[in-house]
Amino acid sequence: GGCHCGAVRFVVRVREHAALDCNCSICKKKAFLHLNVPQVDFVVESGSEALASYEFNTGIAKHRFCRICGVHPFYTPRSHPSDVDVNVRCLDGDVLGRFSLRPFDGARWEQSVAEIPPGGR
């Protein structure tokens, strides 16, 4: 997968074609569909120098985006900071239809966080 301009490219191993559709303020605006994976299943192939990071609230989550095109292909999630959360919309090809999507109430994150499985499950 990668960003829009192609500066950032990554490879991810998908163990389960299931993603979360979060309704929190940032995910709604980015249209981020969450595929949480362990670090071992994710590699940035190119463009790490093109990445910038945005942090808010607790500062645990590292929302990464391409400095050139502004697309957010992945980030370090607050819920599981040792994992990588990949935006399914940034995967190559027409793969979205292969994923089951489950709504996640991120607007009430504190009450809902236990529903987020760690990467690889």
Image: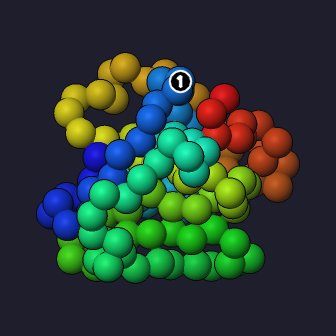
Residue 114: image quadrant is top right
Residue 56: image quadrant is bottom right
Image location of residue 78, percent across then percent down: 69, 61
Q: Reply above or below: 66 against 18.
A: below
**Residue at 53%, 24% in the rendered image:** 16
In the rendered image, the residue lying farthest to the left is: 5
Q: Reply above or below: 56 against 25.
A: below
Which image quarter is the C terminus in?
A: top right
Amino acid type of disc 1? Answer: Glu
Image location of residue 32, percent across then percent down: 44, 50
Please indicate, yes or no, whether residue 90 appears anywhere in the rendered image: no
> Which residue occupies the foreground of this view, 114 or 36?
36
Q: Reply above or below: 92 against 4.
A: above
**Residue at 63%, 68% in the rendered image:** 61
User: What's the coloring here?
Assistant: rainbow
Q: Reply above or below: 6 against 15.
A: below
Instruction: Count how many numbered circles sit on residues in the image.
Output: 1
> Which residue occupies the foreground of this view, 23 or 38?
38
Image location of residue 30, percent across then percent down: 40, 58
Please indicate, yes or no, whether residue 10 appears anywhere in the rendered image: yes
| Left or right of residue 7, residue 62 in this image | right
**Residue at 63%, 58% in the rendered image:** 77
| Left or right of residue 112, residue 18 in this image | left
The local secondary structure at tag 1 comes to loop
**Residue at 56%, 46% in the rendered image:** 40
Q: Which residue is mark 1?
A: 16
- Mark 1 crowd level (few <14, some 14–19, many ≥20, 10 Å Cα): some
Image location of residue 46, percent across then percent down: 27, 64
> Which residue occupies the foreground of this view, 88 or 2?
2
| Left or right of residue 85, residue 105 in this image | right
